[in-house]
């Protein structure tokens, strides 16, 4: 990483990579932006310095986008697993609805066949 030493603090190419030694609240960390520039494609890139994560037990953490990158990846993986579990549940419901529809159609065909045999 390219950097310059100024008053004991290492500066980086990206100012948002610097971790401030002073204690900050989660709200203050949530407002910090690491990158806010247009890229070569013309899109505007905005990356927060800290990702705020609220865990199921109610704990809230501010994860730094460089220092805590592994934890951020773990949180994203957990979210994907929970999303897959939720989608799996909806697939089971759809399967049950399809089975119910098939049973109703079968009953209707049997009733109609019985009535047609009785008529002719």
Image (cartoon, grey):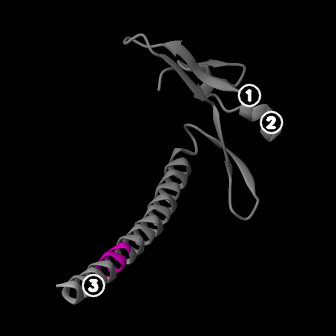
Q: Is residue 102 magenta?
A: yes
Q: Residue at x 39, y 77 (%)?
A: 100
Task: Kindly indicate the quadrant of the structure image that contains residue 103.
Answer: bottom left
Which residue is label 3 attached to? Answer: 115
Position of 57 compared to 87: left or right? right
Q: Are marks 3 and 1 in contact (CB under 8 Å)?
A: no
Which residue is label 2 attached to? Answer: 27
Gap between marks 2 and 1 measured at Cα: 7 Å
Residue furthest out toward the front: 120
Residue 108 seen in this snapshot: yes
Badge 2: few (under 14), some or many (20 or more) residues near its Cα, within 10 Å? few
Position of 27 compared to 78: left or right? right
Q: Are marks 2 and 3 in contact (CB under 8 Å)?
A: no
Q: Are marks 2 and 1 in contact (CB under 8 Å)?
A: yes
Give whichever of discs 2 and 3 has the lower sequence position: 2
Badge 3: few (under 14), some or many (20 or more) residues near its Cα, within 10 Å? few
| Quadrant placement of the C terminus | bottom left
Q: Toward the viewer: 40 or 22?
A: 40
Q: Residue at x 52, y 55 (%)?
A: 79
Which residue is label 1 attached to? Answer: 31
Tell me where residue 43 appears, x and y as whole percent.
45, 15
Badge 1: few (under 14), some or many (20 or more) residues near its Cα, within 10 Å? few
Q: Residue at x 22, y 83 (%)?
A: 113
SS for callout 1: helix
């Amino acid at each position: 990483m390219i950097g310059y030493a100024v008053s004991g603090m290492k500066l980086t190419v990206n100012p948002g990579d610097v971790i401030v030694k002073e204690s900050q609240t989660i709200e203050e960390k949530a407002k910090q932006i690491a990158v806010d520039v247009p890229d070569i494609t013309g899109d505007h890139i905005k990356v927060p310095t800290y990702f705020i994560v609220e865990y199921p037990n109610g704990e809230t953490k501010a994860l730094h986008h460089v220092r805590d990158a592994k934890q951020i990846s773990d949180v994203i993986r957990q979210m994907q697993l929970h999303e897959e579990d939720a989608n799996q549940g909806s697939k089971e419901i759809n399967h049950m609805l399809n089975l119910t529809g098939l049973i109703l159609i079968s009953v209707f065909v049997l009733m109609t066949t019985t009535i047609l045999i009785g008529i002719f």
